[in-house]
Image (cartoon, rainbow, N blue to C red):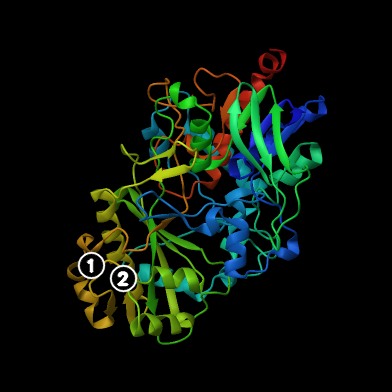
Amino acid sequence: MNRIQADVVIIGSGAGGGTIAQALAPLTADGKKVLVLEQGARLRDDEYTGVESDMARALYEDSGGFLTEQGTLTLAFGRTYGGSTAVYTGTSLIAPERVIRAWDVPDLDHDDIARRCRNFAAQNHVHLLPDDEINDNNRLFELGCRRIGLAAEQFPVNVNGCRGSSLCNLGCPNAAKMGTDRVQLPAAETAGVEVVTRAEALRIEERAVIARVSRPLDGEKGLPSAWEPGEYRIEASAVVVAGGAVGSPALLLRSGFGRLLPRLGEGFTCHPAFILVGEHEERITNDVGHPKSFYLDRAQEEGYVLETCMYFPFITAKNLTGFGPDHSALMKAFPRLQMILVLACDRAVPGNRVSVSGKGVTRVHYEFTPEVRSSLARATVMAARIFFAAGAVRVHAPLASPPLLTRGQADQLDQKISAHEFLPGRTSVSAAHLMGGCAMGRTPEDSVTDAWGRVHGVPWLRIGDSSLFPDSLEINPYLTIMALADRTAEALMGDSAALFDS
């Protein structure tokens, strides 16, 4: 086994790991060695082709098809240089004050979170798209909301030089999305931080990480790792885990920390979601332009959020209920389809958790609560109303029976759409806002870390990603992850004398 000496090892390069790498980069000026381990590959710019099947394999864990143990929910999360920041749409919101207050974590203040979020928003070029860059899919959503008396809000997005390819979820081919792969990681590397790709952290030992570096498979996208293939023992004064809400708790469980931390893996939430489509008589621009410009926030009132979206033909096809001629006819209408993403604001409940098998295989357990089913049904009714108000002639609603609704049924939506039609395994549900599993809190009995990402009872071990969330955030978690990661890095810098001298 190869042996490496470092001062800090950061596991993961997404919103958490990339942020921490940049924040700890000043340590390198003092001669400290800071490493980032990323399980996925670093792609060349010319490898972002926009081909759905190729990019899914190159950028996502299990090609974007990681299934829960129940087989009823697909989890999409990145496995590449930049993590999920390379494959999300760039929406950048600040967490509501009521959510941070409800988390009730001592020494966690909303004003501090908001301040850090604003700093990263500026760093990542977050702004509202001008009106001339809004496509028909988004305009129709805003119009439909307005016609039924609701006000859609515009998403701030972290793009710079967007050319409207709509390929955000497959990695921007124009290098316009300002994720950690384009901002924080390059800045950290310029300052002296070393990022090692294709390096999977297998387990954590006392002040050490055991990792495996792999070579590219034949025909696989991405550059080779900077390190030779093989297993490594990387000894460090501090280890920061930022592998995401699935990867971080699984790694810590695999490393035996569950004996010390009984809440490890618990509290997993994910905003379960599905796509609704409304068919218009005329062709609309849905796959040209930025895909996500507007949203309707009903989280506090009704437990859901509606977002504009554009999904590619394969993902759209698998989300449409049914098969045969009706399904085929709807897919042939793809250029005329308006799309809305329905997200339920789930809550941390007993049983929804991350675990590992006896052989160390990562597992996610997730059951849909009655509250989530009801939220999805209410959201489906609202989305159908928006579609019809915007001029759609037909709406595909997964929780209606039959799922195709015509304009003449627009006044019967409450009767046609029901939570009883939600059948796990039949209704296609996915999630990309993965949260929890290493929650912040007060003690080892109720949490895994304190408000600064320090793992209870293990002073050299820190966490800095979405697994820190004690409960659902209700919105896209990108900026909040960065804010919490920044706090983790700040605390580590403050503790550096004790850590590096011990």
The Cα atoms of the two marked residues, 2 and 1, are separated by 8 Å
Residue located 70% across and 15% down the image? 497
**Disc 2 marks which amino acid?**
Ala
Q: Is residue 56 left or right of residue 190?
A: left
Query: Which of the labelled discs sits on residue 246, or is there none?
Result: none
Along the viewing direction, whichever of 160 and 363 lies nearer the viewer: 363
Query: With respect to residue 476, does 201 lie above or below?
Result: above
Along the viewing direction, whichever of 462 and 20 lies nearer the viewer: 462
Question: Is residue 396 visible to the viewer in this orientation of the structure?
Answer: yes
Residue placed under numbered mark 1 in the picture: 417
Along the viewing direction, whichever of 227 and 18 lies nearer the viewer: 227
Q: Secondary structure at mark 2?
A: loop
Q: Secondary structure at mark 1?
A: loop
Residue 431: x, y in percent?
A: 43, 54
Along the viewing direction, whichever of 113 and 314 lies nearer the viewer: 314
Query: Which of the labelled discs sits on residue 397, or is there none?
Result: 2
